[in-house]
Amino acid sequence: MQRPAMPPRLERKGPTLYTLHMVESVLRKSDEPLSLNRIKVLLPRKVMHPTLREAIEHYKRLGCATEGSKGVMWTLNVDPAFWKVVDAWEAR
């Protein structure tokens, strides 16, 4: 399996662990893509837009979330059978 890229150097403080946990919880509970504004409404406390954007980028870099034209969606697959099949694939 390919290792995730190293995080980019931050010019200021990044999102807190609590913020990352809140965003992850909201994304995992949703079955459809969510816009950033919808995520802000669903979060239990207010989060500034740049902080939310950094949290989303963090999960995208790790391969846990995907962002498209309709919004952001949690895409991490934790099914062991899935990863067993992936490990069996030939490297290109």
Image: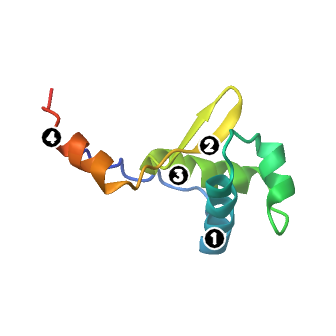
Alpha-carbon span between mark 4 and mark 3: 25 Å
Which is more toward the observer, 22 or 84? 84
Alpha-carbon span between mark 1 and mark 4: 37 Å
Q: Quadrant of the C terminus?
A: top left
Task: Look at discs 1 and 4 and give the one toward the viewer.
Answer: 4
Q: Is residue 44 left or right of residue 92?
A: right
Mark 2 element type: strand
- Whether label 3 touches label 2, CB < 8 Å: no
- Residue that numbered label 1 is attached to: 16
- Residue that numbered label 4 is attached to: 88
Mark 4 element type: helix
Which dot marks residue 59?
A: 3
Q: Earlier in the sequence, mark 3 or mark 2?
A: 3
Q: Is residue 33 visible?
A: yes
Q: Residues within 10 Å of mark 3 (few under 14, many from 20)?
A: some
The residue type indicated by label 2 comes to Met
Alpha-carbon span between mark 2 and mark 1: 20 Å
The residue type indicated by label 4 comes to Ala
- Whether label 4 touches label 3, CB < 8 Å: no
Task: Look at discs 1 and 3 and give the one toward the viewer.
Answer: 3
Which dot marks residue 73?
A: 2
Q: Residues within 10 Å of mark 2 (few under 14, many from 20)?
A: many
| Residue 25, horizontal then vertical, whole percent | 65, 63
Q: Earlier in the sequence, mark 2 or mark 1?
A: 1
- Whether label 2 touches label 1, CB < 8 Å: no
The residue type indicated by label 3 comes to Tyr
Mark 3 element type: helix
Q: Earlier in the sequence, mark 4 or mark 2?
A: 2
